[in-house]
Amino acid sequence: MTNYVVTVHEDATFREIASKLLDQHVSAVPVVDADAHVVGVVSEADLLVKEAAVADRAVWGSWQRDRRGVMATAERARDLMTSPAVTIGPDASVAEAARLMRARRVKRLPVVTASGHLAGILSRADILSIFGRPDDEIRDEVIAAITAGELGSSPGHLEVAVSSGIVTVSGELATSAAAVELLRAIRHVEGVVNVRSQLRFPHEERPATVVVGAP
């Protein structure tokens, strides 16, 4: 995530918001209240919605009390913003962030602490940058986790290779169930694009097919 975040107060005017977006070369900013809690997000799109609503009002003269009416008369961030903001916690995984962005159709996620304070902001570019992680670095982390017993397997029976973010694990495990657990854990290592299994289970009479689903 990016730790330095451009924000506006909920009392910020339309002109102040527009100037900040232009000056800071950002397309959206979190909106905070007097206690620095994140209460919403205002974007270029929100400002354009207001301008479109103003144009509609000029054409039609009056309208129902819907969001277009509110936006046309909005002057402050509190009335222009999208609220509540779609946020994520600092301990969430990259996969969780990607799923949330896709589900809520947002381009950025304010990272908010348990107390509601802003800790940073996560963009689509931040998530994609994870997949530029070097293969050697990914392999070292996977091997270190296996060696430490964090992935539930003995390092002496496994080999790990990484190419273009794709991890291939070979060797022997006691059961296919252990393999499923191992491969799913590896899939959550940052930068891993996919996991391939070349594992064998010599002590299992009828080994199950090992399939790793979405993280």
Image (cartoon, rainbow, N blue to C red):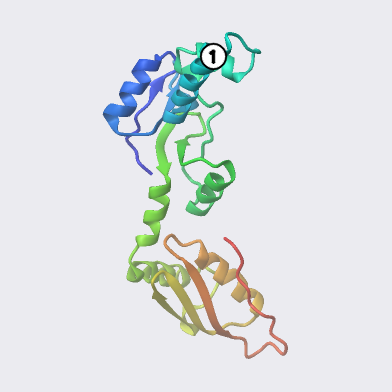
**Is residue 150 among the parts visible in the rendering?**
no
Q: Estimate the x, y position of residue 157 in percent, counting from the top left.
A: 50, 84
In the visual, does 138 lie left or right of 79?
left
Residue drawn at (57%, 41%), measured in percent from left and top?
A: 104
Query: Going 39% across and 14% down the picture, which residue do you hit?
Result: 13
Q: Please state if 180 lies on the left or on the right of 149 as rendered.
A: right
Most foreground residue, 18 or 211: 18
Can residue 161 be seen?
yes
Callout 1 crowding tier (Cα within 10 Å): few <14, some 14–19, many ≥20: few
Q: Nearer the viewer, residue 194 or 36?
A: 194
Up-down relation of residue 19 to residue 171 (above or below) = above
Q: How many marks?
A: 1
Image quarter for residue 29? top left
Q: Position of residue 159 (x, y in %)?
A: 45, 82
Type of the residue with mark 1:
Val
Secondary element type, mark 1? helix
Of 21 and 205, nearer the camera is 21
From this view, report whether residue 31 is shown above or below residue 110: above
Above or below: residue 180 compared with residue 202: above
Picture coordinates of residue 129 (x, y %)? 36, 55
User: At which x and y percent is residue 5?
Assistant: 35, 33
Quarter of image, res 61: top right
Split into 4 quadrants, where in the image is the N terminus?
top left
- The quadrant of the image that shows the C terminus is bottom right
Q: In the orientation shown, which residue stands out farthest toward the top? A: 61
Question: Image point 38% across, 49% down: which residue?
Answer: 125
Which residue position holds label 1?
59
Residue shown at 46%/62% (left/top)?
189
